[in-house]
Amino acid sequence: MRFKDQVHFIRRNMKKNRLRVFMTILATTMACAFLVVLSSVGFGIQKTITDMTMSQQVVTEIQVYGKSDGKDVKKADLEKYDNVKAVVERTTVNEPVKAKLGDRTNTNSTLVFTNMDDELKSNMELEKGRTAKSENEIVVGYNFAKYLWTKKDSEDYEKEISKSQVNYDEIKQPKGFTKDVLNKTIQLNVTKTNDETGKVDGEKSYDFKIVGITKKPNTDWQEDNSIFVSNSFKRDFSKFLDLSKDSSSVEKSTKVYADKFDHVEQLSNDLMDDGYQVMSVTTQLKGANTFFLVFKIGLIFVGCIAVIISAIGIFNTMTMAVTERTQEIGIMKAIGASPSIIRRMFLMESAYIGILGCVIGIIISYGVSYLVNLVVPMILAATSGSDAGDLNYTFSYIPLSLVVIAVVICGGVAVLSGMNPARKATKTNVLTALRREL
């Protein structure tokens, strides 16, 4: 019997019992949709956490905190590793810093010394301007101008804060400097504080020209109010303030940048193998990915219970089909049909039911997933009083891998459900089948 004839025979027999086959396919569809939608919650939560983590920092950045043996981290040693694009060493000043522009003062800035050439190699993203090329040029953070307040602005803001009945979140901050600060010259006042007494030992002023503004942070709650000064100016600055590694006035940090994201995990592992204490996107997500792998397996297992229940329906349908077609099976065997062909026909029928139900279930799952991601933020926004647009969360996500898993599970269970009825069909006695009256 040709394959085409087998398919025609299967379709003809399924049309004889349309209602029964329809109900079996419906059960398989519901089971598959339940499996996919339930598992998509785990994939959605993982995607949300991954996207949030990757949006909060440069994906090629590896933070180096030190070595396990206590030795100093040397830039030259880090540059020897493969796939290293740049190594950036920053020195952050912990002393009070005031940046003045005309009658406005910014007291919330952080002064950072860095190598501008290395920053350029690491692709420091700028909203405007360029990186500093001389000692008296600086790059400021995106929110630097926001905190350039007049004396009156500061006094009014302090008065609002002093009112105990006012919630800090409801206090409206001054607008700051609304004009462009690019190419403006600011006066930077740095205060030296005595570690023992806490008193001010002195104050020194420097003039700098703003030649660049960093790019806006990826998330709304992040702010960049830093002032980046070239390392070439540290010589003059160190005459006033102790910039040694043991000084409490400064904090040193080292960051390694991979040439592309695909090499971050391997580079992080190489550094950790050599005793470096590091943190990167891949190390942050490693533990989370392990947790979500177990979580998703658990959800898929629960969904499989529904698929197994639907398999009982397929088993009953195929068993009844074998019973009803006993005479047809006997005729096929009498005219020379081999047991393998008969077995294949019934397995194809059960697989057809399983795969058709799976396909319809996946289509329904995508619709349900879309509605979940559309409706749930609205419900949460209504209950919390916030804007639905602020909830950039993925509550349900169906990747291609989940679709493949669902097809394999549903198709495999359907075939297994038809194994016993198909085996029963091959063992049908020809004479008994031909004498049977339907």
Image (cartoon, helix red, strand yellow):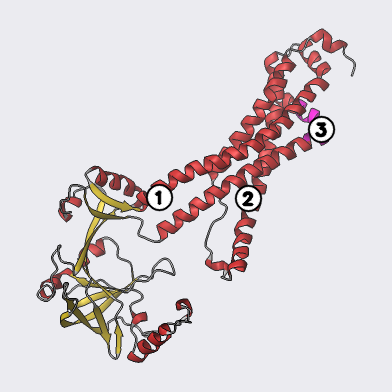
**What residue sits right under mark 3 in the picture?**
15
Looking at marks 1 and 3 on the same chain, the residue that comes earlier in the sequence is marked by 3
Q: Is residue 271 left or right of residue 397?
A: left
Q: 284 or 68: nearer the eye?
A: 68
Q: CA distance from mark 2 to mark 3?
A: 29 Å
Q: Secondary structure at mark 3?
A: helix
Is 205 one of the magenta-colored residues?
Answer: no
Looking at marks 2 and 3 on the same chain, the residue that comes earlier in the sequence is marked by 3
- Is there CB contact under 8 Å for labels 1 and 3? no
Residue 103 lies, in percent from the top left, at: 29, 91
Q: Residue at x 26, y 77 (%)?
A: 211
Q: 324 or 10: nearer the eye?
A: 324
Residue 249 lies, in percent from the top left, at: 18, 70
In this rendering, the answer to whether 140 lies above or below 259 is below
In this rendering, the answer to whether 400 lies above or below 392 is above
**What residue sits right under mark 1 in the picture?**
285
Q: CA distance from mark 1 to mark 3?
A: 52 Å
Q: Quadrant of residue 160?
A: bottom left
| Amino acid type for the residue under numbered disc 3 | Lys
In this rendering, the answer to whether 343 lies above or below 109 is above
